[in-house]
Structure formats: structure tokens, C-alpha cells
């Protein structure tokens, strides 16, 4: 798909490779941490995380349970509203479990701050974070990103799950959106 106001940043092939490496690293790291009969609980943050998560989990060779949480902080703007709305909670039992959050992007860090505080109330054993993207120049609240594909400059990006006004999530590449 060739769309005039999009400029490609990472191709499908580059993304596939990067996600595969991340999945292998996650497998390696958790394989000795998980106790017998324990699952890695993967929590995909909707909507933006759905494609990254679907690709990533297929490279994680461990017992996993996958759940979803829907959060929103953007409305239709390209700037965060600063308030996070919980649109749909998750269902899995996470008390004493290893939880891996899977996000599309850590921008200001406000959404992740909300999510970590919310999850902490369920007393998981440990929470780690995998994010497809990080925009370090926009950081307001810092987070350790345990597994990251790419850092991007302070520009609005779309594709591979990320949207502009609900569009472009289905692109299999990542692009800069030029308004
Ligand atoms: P936060 O500012 O870290 O709270 O990020 C909030 C959410 O904004 C992210 O989870 C994304 O869904 C969205 N977001 C931030 N930057 C971009 C972007 O460049 N393109 C598309 N969505 C973005
Ligand atoms: Mg998101």
C-alpha cells in the first residue's frame, strides 16, 4: 500500500527479524525463571499492541497464557490527553505470577505508569515490559523497557498496530506520518 503522507521507517522484513530476536531473548531469559507448572502471563495492551504481540508470542517457546487489557489516553489527537482510561480489564489470575506487558510504544510513559500501578494491586510476582517502540525525547515518566525493538525520534508513527485517528494499524511496516 503506497499512501502519500507516509514515509517508511522500518520494513516488514526488518521488523520480523527484530521481533524474532526479541522472542528468542524472552524465551532464553524466562526459561530458568519459570517454575514447573508456572506460566508466563503475557498482557497485550490494546489496541496498539495487537500485531506486535501476535508476532512476538509465536517466537516465545515457553508455557504462556495470553490476556488483553484495553487502555486509551489519546482520543483522536496526536498528543496524549494525560489521563488514561481503562476500557476493558484483563481476566487472567496474575497474583504471584510472572507478567510480561506487551505495548506498542512508550511515549510520555503516562499510560505505562497507570498500568503498572493498576497491575501492582493484583500482587504479581514480577512485571516486565516489552515494547515495540520507545520515543525517548517525549519521556515524562521513565520506565525500564526490558525488551525493545526500536527507539524512534519525536515524530508521529503509524503501522504495525499504531494508528492515526484509528487508521493505518494494518500496515505491515512502520511509517512516519506527515500531516
Ligand atoms: P504514552 O504517552 O506513553 O502514555 O503513550 C500513550 C499511547 O499513545 C501509546 O500506547 C500509543 O497507543 C499512543 N502513541 C504514542 N505515540 C504514538 C505515535 O507516534 N503513533 C501512534 N500512537 C502513538
Ligand atoms: Mg498503546
Image (cartoon, rainbow, N blue to C red):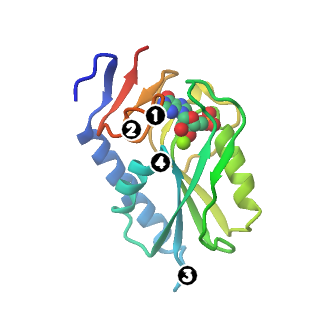
SS for tag 4?
loop
- How many numbered discs sit on the rendered protein? 4
Q: Earlier in the sequence, mark 3 or mark 4?
A: 3
Evaluate if marks 2 and 3 touch, with contact meaning CB atoms under 8 Å apart. Answer: no
Circle 2 SS class: loop
Going 43% across and 50% down the picture, which residue do you hit?
Answer: 50
Q: Give the number of the mark in front: 2 or 1.
A: 1
Give me the residue at 48% from left, 29% from top: 165
- Depth order, front residue of 5/97: 5
Q: Residue at x 68, y 44 (%)?
A: 85
Can you tell me whether the CB of the residue at mark 4 lies under 8 Å from the nearest atom of ligand 2?
Answer: yes
Residue on which the image places disc 4:
49
Residue 166 bears which disc, if any? 1
Q: Which residue is mark 2?
A: 169
Q: Is residue 69 above or below residue 33?
A: above
Q: Quarter holding the N terminus? A: top left
Q: CA distance from mark 3 to mark 4?
A: 27 Å
Q: Is residue 73 visible?
A: yes
Q: Which residue is mark 3?
A: 35
- For marks 1 and 4, the one nearer the N-term is 4
User: What is the quadrant of the C terminus in the image?
Assistant: top left
Looking at the rendered image, the disc whose residue lies closer to the viewer, 1 or 4, is 1
Furthest toward the bottom, the residue is 36
Earlier in the chain: of badge 2 and badge 4, it is 4
Image marks 2 and 1: residues in contact by CB distance under 8 Å: yes
Question: Residue 53: x and y, percent?
Answer: 42, 54
Mark 2 or 4, closer to the camera: 2
- Determine the residue located farthest toward the top in the rendered image: 179
Amino acid at each position: 500500500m503506497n499512501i502519500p503522507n507516509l514515509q517508511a521507517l522500518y520494513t516488514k522484513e526488518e521488523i520480523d527479524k527484530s521481533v524474532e530476536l526479541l522472542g528468542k531473548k524472552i524465551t532464553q531469559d524466562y526459561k530458568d525463571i519459570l517454575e514447573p507448572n508456572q506460566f508466563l502471563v503475557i498482557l497485550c495492551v490494546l489496541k496498539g499492541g495487537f500485531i506486535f504481540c501476535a508476532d512476538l508470542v509465536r517466537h516465545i517457546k515457553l508455557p504462556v497464557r495470553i490476556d488483553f487489557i484495553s487502555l486509551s489516553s489519546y482520543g483522536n489527537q496526536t498528543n496524549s490527553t494525560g489521563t488514561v482510561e481503562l476500557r476493558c480489564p484483563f481476566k487472567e489470575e496474575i497474583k504471584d505470577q510472572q507478567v510480561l506487558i506487551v505495548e506498542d510504544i512508550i511515549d510520555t510513559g503516562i499510560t505505562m505508569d497507570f498500568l503498572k500501578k493498576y497491575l501492582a494491586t493484583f500482587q504479581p510476582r514480577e512485571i516486565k515490559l516489552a515494547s515495540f517502540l520507545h520515543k525517548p525525547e517525549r519521556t515524562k515518566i521513565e520506565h525500564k523497557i526490558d525488551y525493545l525493538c526500536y527507539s524512534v525520534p519525536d515524530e508521529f508513527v503509524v503501522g504495525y498496530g499504531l494508528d492515526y485517528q484509528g487508521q493505518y494499524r494494518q500496515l505491515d511496516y512502520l511509517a512516519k506520518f506527515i500531516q
